[in-house]
Image: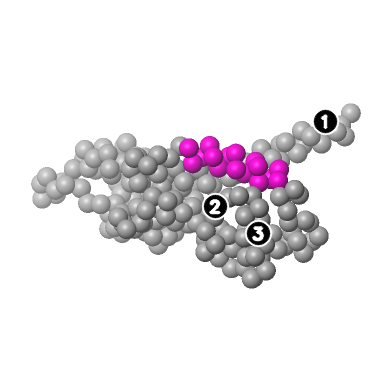
Amino acid sequence: MRISELSEQSGVSIPTIKFYLREGLLAPGVLVTKTQSAYDETHLRRLRLVRALRDVAGLPIASIADVMAAVDSEAVSLLDLLGVTQVAVSGVSGDTSARGLRLAEEFIAELGWRVATESPLMRSLGRLLEELADRGIPITVAALGPWASAAHSVAAVEVAGITADMPRDQAAEIVAMGTPLFGELLSQLRLAAQESESRRRFGQ
């Protein structure tokens, strides 16, 4: 397909496509004449991923380039690619105290989940658990189990949509779209459920 068709099918303007080509976020098309290149489904998939990272997750070009490098690297496993994308779009920070990291490790172990200790997600969780503990909230599965159970149920559905044989950029797109959008959906549904339960218990 020509660049005009690529633009029409992807919803990305021609100037933006050319910008992505210059930045190396999109592979060049196959040169068919001195002034025209041909593009295919791989370019469409890549543009969908770039749009998810840019428009949905709001990442800067440099961060998008890091994700694209992981997509294209044969040395990066699918598991690590999903992790790179998740960390990029979630914006988690790797800063926490030794106490916070210990709280996170103990809590995750008690849940029986498999999360790498060196993951920025573990450190981000540790920072939150430390704050909860400082406010007198028990950091145990017994106390926080409902939140962990809800999170695990949602995560299982999300990960089930990714298969080992799908194109890597498509797998990354699922994470790039799903992490912010379904995270916000979960947050909004929780608020709606709080109102519903409040009306059931305290309403007329």
Quick one: label 3 or label 2, which is nearer the N terminus?
3
Rendered image quadrant of residue 20: bottom left
Secondary structure character of the magenta stretch overall? helix
Expressed as whole percent of the image width and height from the top left, the position of residue 171 reads 40, 44
Element type where label 3 sits in the image: helix
Q: Who is closer to the viewer here, 139 or 202?
A: 139
Q: Nearer the viewer, mark 1 or mark 3?
A: 3
- Foreground mark, 1 or 2, reads 2
Residue carrying label 3: 106
- Residue 179 in percent (x, y) is at 52, 46
The image quadrant where one finds the C terminus is top right
Query: Which residue does the image show at 62% across and 44% down from the upper left?
Result: 151
Q: How far, Cα to Cα, is label 1 from label 3?
A: 36 Å
Looking at the image, which residue sits at the far bottom? Answer: 98
Question: How much space separates mark 1 and mark 2, taking CA atoms?
Answer: 37 Å
Give the magenta part as a residue range.
145-160
Whether residues under marks 1 and 2 lie with C-beta atoms below 8 angstroms apart, the answer is no
The answer to whether 139 is drawn above or below residue 11 in the figure is: below
